[in-house]
Amino acid sequence: MIKKLIQDIETLQGLMVAYVTNGREDEQPKEYKTIYLKVHFALEDMNYSDPNKYRTLEEFWGFCKSEFSSYAERRAYTEEIYDDVIIDLCRKLVNKPEPKKWRVTNELLTDNLEPIRRQWLKAKNFLLSDKPDFENCIKEATNSVESALQILLEELGVSLGRTIKKSNVDNDIKKIISQMYGFVSNKDFVRHGGTKNQNLDFYDAEFFLELAGISIKYLKDKI
């Protein structure tokens, strides 16, 4: 099933690239719609957020025409859309283990919290990559908590530090979650640029990923 899904995604990407470069053919829009829906529902069944917002090739062409002048840019953007999902699907093929709380949290991200799934997937991919990026893992994990709070409290665009203060959770737990935000704000190369190597390692990043997962579950249950 996973291999077939990856193949279908690659077929979609091939159609997208052809349509916005020099390989356009009349039958492509119809073929794209059929495969798009197939991929969309397969991703949904596997608890992924569909990263492709373009339901038709015409819609995709309109975006690319206005944003990218070169074929190379359009190809790169097409590959980027599914990057995180394909990385994770390939990891599943070789049964690479996931962080303990990642799947539990991912399954909680439904309904209005569903858009956070892509952020949450990025956090895991940064941790488990062949060339891991611990700083970005911590950033995306903390951002996912911030996004969950914004949605649950209907405070879109407000920082984690400010939204947590408005929640009805225990004051000591507020402090713990606020300190996550403080950590990523204070560390070079995590939320902001920097000049000092922070020497963050796998265990630091895994800790924040697990803490973020527990925090999202707690906030969803409590709020």
Image (tube, rainbow, N blue to C red):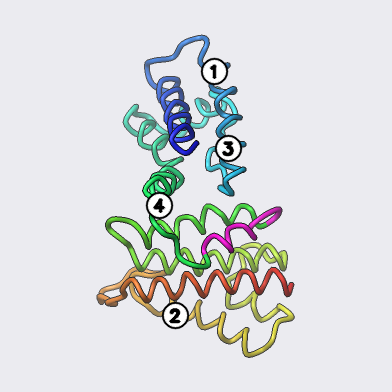
Sequence order check, earlier mark of 1 and 2: 1
Local SS, label 4: loop
Tell me the element at label 2. helix
Dot 4 corresponds to which residue? 95
Residue stretch rendered in magenta on the structure: 102-112
- Few, some or many C-alpha atoms within 10 Å of disc 2 (few <14, some 14-19, many ≥20)? some
Residue 105 at x, y = what percent?
58, 63
- In this rendering, the label closer to the viewer, 4 or 2: 4
Mark 2 residue type: Phe
The kind of residue tagged 4 is Asn
Q: Mark 3 points at which residue?
A: 42
Q: Sequence-wise, which precedes: disc 2 or disc 3?
A: 3
Residue at 61% x, 30% y: name it: 37
Q: Are marks 1 and 2 in contact (CB under 8 Å)?
A: no
Residue 211 percent across, percent down from the top left = 51, 75
User: How far apart are the alpha carbons under marks 4 and 2?
Assistant: 32 Å
In the rendered structure, find residue 111 and report the number of the disc placed on it.
Answer: none
**What is the CA distance from the residue labelled 1 to the residue labelled 3?**
17 Å
| Above or below, 76 relative to 152 | above
Front residue (pair 54, 100):
100
Front position in the image: 25 or 103: 103
Q: In this view, does 81 lie above or below 60?
A: below
**Residue at point 27%, 58% (across, down):** 131
Majority secondary structure in the magenta region: helix
Q: Is residue 6 magenta?
A: no
Q: Position of residue 145 (x, y in %)?
A: 57, 68
Q: What residue type is labelled 3?
A: Ala
Disc number at residue 31? 1
First-in-chain label (4 vs 1) = 1
Residue on which the image places disc 2 = 183
